[in-house]
Image (cartoon, rainbow, N blue to C red):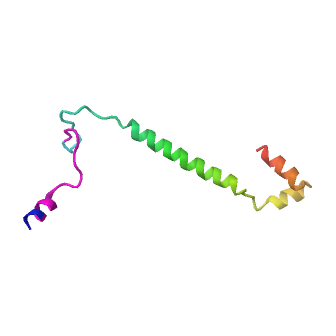
Amino acid sequence: MEREDHEAQRPLLVTVGGSSGDGRQGAAPPTSSSSSVAALVGSTAVAVAGSFEFGISVGYSSPCQPGIMRDFDLSIPEYTLSMAQF
């Protein structure tokens, strides 16, 4: 029972490197958050690129595609070639 009380009073987040928990640093030098920013930017770029690649690989076709083909009198290869320029 005594051990359970001791466990319940321990903090969930452990301070590392002499940090007092109130934003002030103790003996440890201030750390840079550039690595976490780089990881965030990198993972975001991977997620966006993955979504874009998936959209390209499944061959998204617009609901207005038949209308464009009819208006400009284009065959499927002609339409594909003209839309690849955009």
Q: Position of residue 73 (x, y in %)?
A: 92, 55
Q: Residue at x 10, y 62 (%)?
A: 3
Left or right: 50 as drawn, with respect to 73: left
Q: Residue at x 48, y 42 (%)?
A: 41
Q: Quadrant of the C terminus?
A: top right
- Judged from this view, the residue extending furthest toward the bottom is 1
Q: Quadrant of the N terminus?
A: bottom left
Considering only vertical position in the picture, is 68 above or below 82? Answer: below
Considering only vertical position in the picture, is 55 above or below 35? Answer: below
Task: Read off the magenta span.
Answer: 4-19
Q: Residue at x 22, y 33 (%)?
A: 28
38 vs 2, nearest the viewer? 2
Confirm whether the magenta stretch covers residue 7.
Answer: yes
Considering only vertical position in the picture, is 10 above or below 37? Answer: below
Confirm whether the magenta stretch covers residue 2.
Answer: no
Left or right: 4 as drawn, with respect to 82: left
Q: Residue at x 75, y 59 (%)?
A: 62
Q: Position of residue 42 (x, y in %)?
A: 50, 42
